Structures are given as C-alpha cells and as structure tokens.
Amino acid sequence: MISISEIKSAINLPVIAEIPIENNGNPIAINEGPATATSEQLRALRTKLHYIHGNRSNGRVTLVTSSIAGEGKSFVSTNLSISLALTQRKVVLLELDMRKPKVTKVFNINNDNLGLSDYFMNKASISSIIQKSGIASNLDIIGSGTPIHNPAELLEKSELEVLIDELRKTYDDIVIDSPPVHLVPDAVTVSKHADTCLYIVRQGITSKNELTFLQSLIDQDQLKNVSIVFNSINSVKHGYGYKYDNSYYNHTKRNVLQSIFSDFKNRF
C-alpha cells in the first residue's frame, strides 16, 4: 500500500491534500453542515488551489485526472466544485470523462440531456448544454451528453478550445473531470487548455508503476503544473478525527497556511 513518503520519493511533485476515507457512501462530502475530516481537507485543497492559480482570480481552469479508474477523480472534482461554489465563486463542472460519466449521476441530472458530445458534433450550442447543479445557484454542470464511441477524436477538434474560452468569460472556476491518463489519451489532450492539473493518487489502488508513468508524462511536457491529491487515506493512521471544536479550526487554519508555504517553498 503506497504511502505519502513513497509518493514524495517517487516523484518530485507537491502533495497538496490528504483526503481521508469516509464510509457513509455519500459521493458529496462537503456542504454547509457539520465538518468532517474529509470536508476539512477538501476546504484545504480549495485554499491551496487559490495559491496555485496565483494572480488569476477568474476564468481559472483546473483539470482533475488520475492514472486508472477507481482512484476518485470524479469524487474530488465534484466536491472541489461544490467547495468553490460555497465561497460564492461562479463554478462550472465539465463531465469530460465521456466513456464512464459519473458527475451527472451524482447530481441526479438526466444524461439524456444535451451535453458535451452533442456540442462537439455541432448538434448543440454552448448555452443549451449548461445545466443547474441543484445544489447551489452558482454551480453549473455540463454533462457528457449523448454516448459516443470516439471521444478522443472529438476532443481534438477546435470546439473544445472555443468552449473553454467562452466559459472563461463567464465563470470564476472551470473544473474538468477527465478520464484517467493511463487508459486513454483524452486527459493529455484536454490538459493543453488547463491552467493546472490535480492528479489523484489513491491509497491501496495507485501503484508505484503509475507514478513512474506520471513522471514520464511530465518529462515529455504532456502534463504541466501538476499537484498530487492523496485520496482515501487511513484516517486513524494519519490522526484524523471526524468531529471538531473551535480549537481544532484554529489549529487546522495554522497548519493549512504552514503547509501551503512549505509546499511552495519546496516546489520553487
């Protein structure tokens, strides 16, 4: 089972979040209710993302991907989008994993609606594929659309660049849930249009070989501005609890800020 120390020794990338396991089965782990270890780490991820994007305050594009299926990229992209929306930022989440779409299921959106594939095939306008999340008025979803057999070819079309450019004009944050990079080339294609990439590594799923593959992508400049999110870690082993008092929040805030500056000092 891979550890955070093994991640850091295998690849020279910052680990900007360590998200604990929650066993309640709910794919939405962050809301305005009581805090949990998972929701606090997602909020910490949101804070670090602001630092990663630097001076850009709107039109920010964040790609979320992983090596293989089952590492939690859709979970992270969904909850990161909700977390950003809770700070009153205008957010849109793109379901670009068109082979195995999960985002629309989480938000109970009918995937029979027009979506990305329909737009890429010139069968729908941008405005017609944007749907409300049903969770926050400032969080929109663009689903994968009509099932297709050739998403890789569609993503090579100029329509993707046009879409991203238009969304940048309207939204503070564009979050992209993309397919795993070790299975299909889609994420590498989409990464050309992203400002930063969050790469999900899952304890018990991701292997050292996958980290070696990630390093090869970075060496070839196929993925840029990459940060690691360590997902589904053992909360007991890492000292996370599930209920917090005021002293916890003060302690966490200090730790988050210290971690941010430490990561970026080491990175540069």
Image (tube, grey):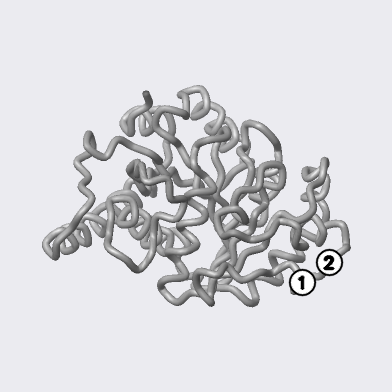
Name the disc covering residue 220, or none. Answer: none
Residue 184: where, in percent of width, then height?
A: 69, 35
Which residue occupies 35% across, 52% down? Answer: 264
Label 1: which secondary element: helix
Determine contact: label 1, label 2, CB under 8 Å. Answer: yes
Name the disc covering residue 128, or none. Answer: 1
Tell me the quarter of the picture where residue 125 sits.
bottom right
Residue 70: where, in percent of width, then height?
A: 53, 35
Q: Marks 1 and 2, Cα distance to the nearest angstrom?
A: 6 Å
Residue 104 versus residue 229 in the image, above or below: below
Which amino acid type is shown beneath numbered disc 2?
Ala
Q: Which residue is mark 2?
A: 124
Which residue occupies 61% across, 71% down? Answer: 132
Q: Which residue is outermost to the right?
A: 122
Residue 91: where, in percent of width, then height?
A: 55, 69
Q: Which quadrant holds the N terminus?
A: top left
Residue 140: tell me if it is visible: yes
Tell me the quarter of the picture where residue 114 sits.
bottom right
Residue 190: where, in percent of width, then height?
A: 68, 50
User: Is 17 displayed left or right of 224 in the figure?
Assistant: left
User: Is 194 displayed left or right of 83 in the figure?
Assistant: right
Which residue occupies 63% across, 77% down? Answer: 170
Which amino acid type is shown beneath numbered disc 1?
Ser
